[in-house]
Amino acid sequence: MAAQDQEHFRDSIGTINDAGKRAWVYPKKPVGKLYEYRKLVSYALLLFLFGAPFVHINGNQFLMFNVLERRFNIFGFPFWPQDFHLFVMMMIIGVVFVVLFTVAFGRIFCGWICPQTIFMEMVFRRIEYWIDGDRGKQIRLNNMPWNAEKIRKRLLKWSVFFVISFLIANVFLAYLIGSERLLQYITDGPANHVSTLISLLIFTGVFYFVFAWFREQVCIIVCPYGRLQGVLLDTKSILVAYDYKRGEKEAGRAKFKKTEDREATGKGDCIDCFQCVNVCPTGIDIRNGTQLECVNCTACIDACNQMMEAVNLPKDLIRYASEENIEKKTKFQFTPRLKGYTAVLIILIGVLSGMLFLRNDVEANVLRLPGQLYEHKAEDIISNVYTFKLINKTTRKIENVHFELISHSGSIKVVSQETLEVPAQGLAEGTLFIEVKSADLEGEKEQLKIGVYSGERLIETTRTIFLGPRSYN
């Protein structure tokens, strides 16, 4: 492969010029079948992203990640700090899932699902095409002196970018603090929530900076996923690839001439039109092979197919393919490596399912009051004092709550109240005494099993340590 014999392009990223300065990317507007599919996927994901915080299931926000209060809702299920192990398991499953698909299909996540790519290419870039025009017009506008047209277009674009960044920041805040609280803050007015407004403006500034200036550098420099793909990919991974066998042939690539017989001259099917380069949002030449800057957006596939169709050559010179598919014409194989990742993913999903099945809606903690010893009461009864905490993870209040001993005969008395009420998504706490007859105890430290009941229904069990005298018999 002639283009891959020269590896100097790997000495620098595609958005840095020879002088070491940033080379601003002006990608041509993509057109083609895959781009239309990407638009459908992107707008469906955007609808989900903007709608999820405002959808509630059984009173719970569909998705919420309230880090400050350590409350999380995932698909309508509430998770508390006590459920952090479940949240961690979900994150691990997400990572393994992305790794599996990277090994199989390269950076397909980046090109089709990543919020950075979707916002950049399907929102901000399309607005730029609408205001500034396509690639050639954008370059001319950038080189133009600051006249009335340039000032008007720049102010319009920057204003629209700021408004969209502000909307994104609001949705982001809805995921953090909850949509109901956000709407309440809006109703109250910004003057009553100055700290929240400042946070909102900071988020807006970050989003504006990323999408108006930093752009593709997020994928190339900041995001570690591009570096990870070098470890995860192998020659069997399917990714956006240039068929150098067909594109170069014996005589290499060359400009198209209507009068020549390319097959007879030994020239490759690549006509060196640079459309794949011009349309690339990260400014690379896909013909140089796999590169960390490539996000598998498929824009180069559409551009190349259009040119191949125009010059009456077979399409798919650039396509989804593996190195082995291009080199040896092999088909996709479910390799032992993929089988291993799949097995790990299935096991983790099974473990998470079991953990979710065993998870209770109420969490109870009964702990001995520090520094307090047992009390020997009349009729040979031993008493210990405890503090308790009941956490209700549901959106409905739990009434008529009381405690009963399951493992031993005895009684539990809650201080100042006989039954409890645990508010929805809240907690109840207090002090209680546990009394057990000394004849039922076998040692100075005994483990008790306590049942938490709502009326006659057992809703949770917990264990605690009971202290007594050294010997009872």
Image (spheres, grey):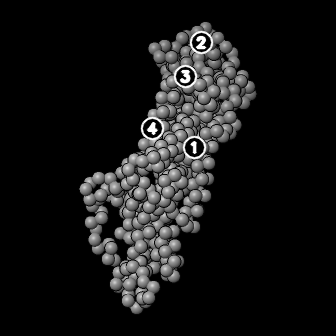
- Which residue does the image show at 67% across and 38% down from the upper left? 56
| Most foreground residue, 23 or 202 | 23
Choose between 229 and 241: the one closer to the eye: 241
Residue at far left of view: 19
Question: What amino acid does circle 1 point to?
Answer: Met
User: Distance between the Cα atoms at labels 3 and 1?
Assistant: 45 Å
Residue 24 lies, in percent from the top left, at 37, 54
Circle 3 or circle 1, nearest the eye: 3
Q: Earlier in the sequence, mark 3 or mark 1?
A: 3
Residue tagged by mark 3? 191
Q: Based on the displayed image, in which of its 4 quarters is residue 5 positioned?
A: bottom left
**SS assignment at label 3:** helix
> In this orientation, does residue 196 appear?
yes
Sooner in the amino-acid sequence: mark 4 or mark 2: 4
Instruction: Answer few, some or many: residues within 10 Å of disc 4's Cα (few below 14, many 20 plus, some between 14 and 19).
Output: some
Which disc is residue 467 wearing? none
Q: Nearer the viewer, mark 2 or mark 1?
A: 1
The label nearer to you, 2 versus 3, is: 3
SS label for mark 2: helix
Q: Are marks 4 and 2 in contact (CB under 8 Å)?
A: no
- Residue under numbered circle 1: 355
In the rendered image, which quarter contains the C terminus?
top right
Query: In the image, is residue 449 above or below residue 158?
Result: above
Q: Amino acid at mark 3?
A: Ala
Tell me the amino acid under the disc marked 2.
Asp
Q: Which residue is mark 4?
A: 205
Report the residue marked by disc 2.
Answer: 380
